[in-house]
Image (cartoon, helix red, strand yellow):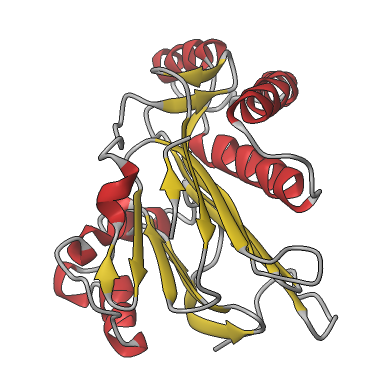
Amino acid sequence: MRCSNAGRQPRGLDQAADSYVYESKQTLEQPVTSVKRQFLCRYAYGRAAETVMLSEKGQDYMAFAIDGGVCSFVLCDGVGLSFRGDFASRYLGSGLLSWLRSGNELGLQQLESKLMELSQGAARESASLRVDDNIPQLLKEVLLEKQRQGSEAMYICGRIELPGRFQRKGKMWMAWQGDSRLRMFQHHMELTSRFGGRFHTSERWSTRCGPVGGKPNVYECRLDNPSGYRLLMYSDGLNDLDPISEAVPDDQVQVLMNSLHTGGLEDDASFLEISW
């Protein structure tokens, strides 16, 4: 491998035999579910207990698409202290997934251009979101100021391409800003150190100005072997997974998603594992 740093039917199921698309619905939980095409994907989505109690949208957004021998994915975590982090994560995530699936060339310059394009569209849509007139005036003023400052989200995104008729070796391209977890394994050996530990909360995307806290982090590599890989990503609501290197069984992932020992999740949680 040569690398360089550079249960229920979900919403969005594609009917094609070798294709599958999942998009988290921010108003509902998704129990641990698996789908097998040319990739094996396990995924789950849950809102924080307080968010569920208030019947609010989750701040996380997660989606992936299997298109034959190509898997594209996004995992976004809206910044709660910004205005409508749920909106930011959904807008960014859906826009990035469409871009990844388009087959366009992937690189830092292309990503930065896309992030700026998405920020401009999101800024226009965010400006049209109304603040409830029935809330206390002081709270309303705070929310209006946050709206002027923009909405923010952290993200992981990428595309995996398996070897095919016109491509002798597979390849993987990924990018991120923020502290959501991104881990990689090959034949049970963890390779996450190759990402360089560049996962910081100060880095994110903003509807006001695009990338914040520096340039996006980019990692790309050739996949010299056609199989034996496992890519794992999850938001900070599942940080109990941090010290665990082996694949966690479905029922144990669901235990973490339910978090009955703490009365529910303390933060939104998204889980996506891609194996091939």
Query: Viewed as shown, does residue 103 lie left or right of 137?
Result: right
Residue 25 in sight from this viewpoint: no
Q: Nearer the viewer, residue 121 or 227?
A: 227
Tell which of 213 and 70 is nearer to you: 70
Q: Residue at x 40, y 59 (%)?
A: 233
- Total labels: the figure holds 0
Height in image: 160 above or below 79? below
Picture quadrant of residue 162: bottom right
Q: What residue sits 74% from the left and 19% below the top?
A: 124
Q: Quadrant of the N terminus?
A: bottom left
Q: Is residue 28 visible?
A: yes
Query: Which residue is farthest right?
Result: 16
Residue 15, quarter of picture: bottom right
Does 120 sit left or right of 170 as displayed?
right
- Left or right position of 126 against 138: right
When asked about the image quadrant of residue 8, the answer is: bottom right
* Residue at x-position 58% and y-position 14%: 208
Give the image location of residue 87, x and y in percent: 59, 38
- Residue 131: x and y in percent read 59, 25
**x and y percentages locating residue 176 in the rendered image:** 46, 39
Residue 235 versus residue 128: which sits nearer the camera? 235
127, above or below 27, in the image: above
Q: Position of residue 140 (x, y in %)?
A: 48, 18
